[in-house]
Image: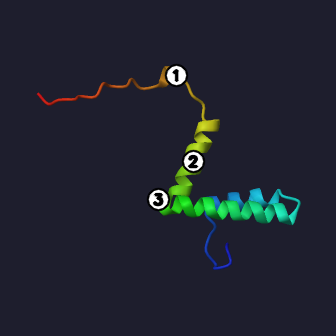
Amino acid sequence: MNDRGLNLTSTEMLKGYILSRFKEPKDREKANRFWKESIQSLHAQSKEEDQRFFQAWLRSQYADHDPSRAKPVLPMRTSRR
């Protein structure tokens, strides 16, 4: 739980883990400022944008990609008949 008694989001838990890895307080503070600015920028798009960002990034890095399972791309229709 956070200091307001609410459950932590996945993003907040990730932030806590990342910041805990810094040994120097000065580096941790710098990373914390960068994190806050970045998350505020994402939240300017939508409240859930931080979650979507990390989901997309993690999938791009760690999801198994099997081209044989890809769905065929259908051509776009440009005019109605």
Please, is residue 34 above or below residue 81 in the view? below
Question: Could you tell me how far apart the alpha carbons at marks 1 and 3 are, in whole angstroms?
Answer: 32 Å
Crowding near pointer 3: few (<14 within 10 Å), some, many (20+)?
few
- Report the side of 25 relative to 67 (left or right): right
Q: Quadrant of residue 8?
A: bottom right
Which residue lies under the disc numbered 1? 67
Q: Earlier in the sequence, mark 1 or mark 2?
A: 2
Asked if disc 2 and disc 3 are in contact, CB closer than 8 Å, the reply is no
Give how far apart the Cα atoms at labels 2 and 3 are. Answer: 16 Å
- Residue placed farthest to the left in the image? 81
Residue highlighted by disc 3: 45
Mark 2 residue type: Gln
Residue at 55% across, 55% down: 51
Which badge, 2 or 3, is on the more N-terminal residue?
Answer: 3
Residue 9, quarter of picture = bottom right
Could you classify mark 2 by the number of other residues whose Cα lies within 10 Å: few (under 14), some (14-19), or many (20 or more)? few
Please name the residue that numbered disc 2 is placed on.
55
Instruction: List x then y, in percent, for residue 66.
Output: 55, 24
Q: Is residue 74 left or right of residue 57?
A: left
27 lies left or right of 5: right
Total numbered badges shown on the rendered structure: 3
Type of amino acid under label 3: Gln
Q: Quadrant of the N terminus?
A: bottom right
- State the separation of the CA atoms marked 1 and 2: 21 Å
**Would you say the residues marked 1 and 3 are in contact, meaning their CB atoms lie under 8 Å apart?**
no
Residue 12 position within the rendered picture, expressed as x and y whole percent measured from the top left:
66, 63
